[in-house]
Image (tube, grey):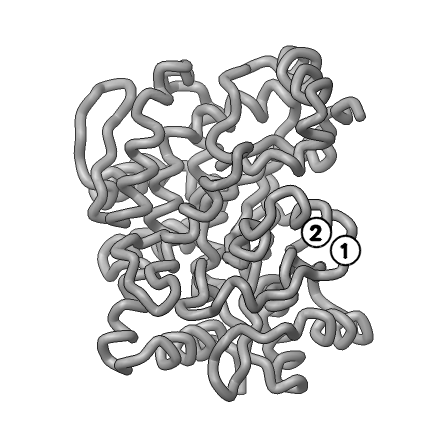
Amino acid sequence: MPLEPFKTSAPLTLGVELELQLVSLSDFDLVEASPDMLELMQRKRFPGHVVPEITESMIEVSTDVHVDHDGLLRQLRDIRDALVAAGDTLNVGVCGGGTHPFQQWNERRIYAKPRFKEVSALYGYLAKQFTIFGQHVHVGCRSGDEALFLLHSLGRYIPHFIALSASSPFVQRNDTLFHSARLNSVFAFPLSGRAPFVLRWDEFESGYFAHMERTGIVKSMKDFYWDIRPKPEFGTIELRVCDTPLTVERAAALAGYLQTLSHSLLERTQAPPEEQDYLVYNYNRFQACRFGLDGTLVDPKTYTSRSLREDIQDTLQRLAPHADTLGSQAALEHIRELTAVGNDASFLRGQYRERGSAEGMVEAAIKGFRRSRPD
């Protein structure tokens, strides 16, 4: 099937998708509750969109299209409250976090949807191991050329979003020593990683994608698990590296940071992206996954090294005028505070030490998701 034309979108509009954990409130393990959750929410008015994910212990929610951080945050809070109310009805906890700290992948059930069954047949046990939880952020673009320029310009900042969103330090009851262990599962897929360095949509469409389609390996953009990928049917680029945060406030702040950064990059006052920028891409990405905000970032243009925390803080200062234009000051302030107090992975490790069990850590994540919900 040929790649569909790139749909024009209002520039810098935002949409967020969150993959969330469904947890038993008796033992805090994952529970196969998505069929019941979906049926319940389909009978009520839901403030966003809700769909199944690949296993029945997951659910994915998404927002409408928004122009600013404040509107996005309001809807995410409404979505959160609706999910929590549905979970209360079913005695199911809902929470963020990039991985569940002790679930057994072999116990998961593939959701009965044709595409999920195809993925399971193709990737074997990797499909059930894909019971991991991420946040995706869409940014509207005026054209396919603009989308590809922005996609590659953001490559240098991918480690920012990994370190800021990291919330998956535990797997199979073990501290992995990573801040984002979730991405190790994504990297196992053969079509993961980065997009090819192409800056013209017609070349991407008639060259790269057409050749890939002829191989029979891919049918649509859904078959690529890239860190950022274009979504022509929406007229967006989609950032896919973030772990699902523990709160919707953090999810909205990450989206606002991406919007503000994109606004800055589209001014094209910085050096344009080049293929050689990707020479340090995997190293920088690993540093963010392994060490979080304390990881090292090598600048592909200047070859200088410094901590991700320092690089993010300097970027926030540079983005201040753009935040004033977009009304994203609250989002950037949240990110600034995050660099000072630490990410969700650090919080979860602290909860494990304080509570003494992985179950206690999940309980803290459930409470965190409800945090600002009115009583």
Mark 2, residues whose alpha carbon is within 10 Å: few (<14), some, or many (≥20)? some
Residue type at tag 1: Lys
Mark 1, residues whose alpha carbon is within 10 Å: few (<14), some, or many (≥20)? few
Residue 91 % position (x, y): 61, 86
Q: Which mark is residue 9?
A: none
Q: Quadrant of residue 143?
A: top right
Tell me the residue at 36%/52% (across/down): 180
**Left or right of 64: which side holds 113?**
right
Residue 52 % position (x, y): 69, 60
Q: Nearer the viewer, residue 160 or 109?
A: 109
**Left or right of 285: which side holds 65?**
right
Judge whether residue 82 can be spotted in this image: yes
Tell me the residue at 31%/79% (across/down): 357
Q: Nearer the viewer, residue 332 or 123?
A: 123
Q: Which mark is residue 116?
A: 2
Give the answer, above or below, for where 15 lies relative to 157.
below
Judge whether residue 337 can be spotted in this image: no
Q: Are marks 1 and 2 in contact (CB under 8 Å)?
A: yes
Q: Which residue is mark 1?
A: 113
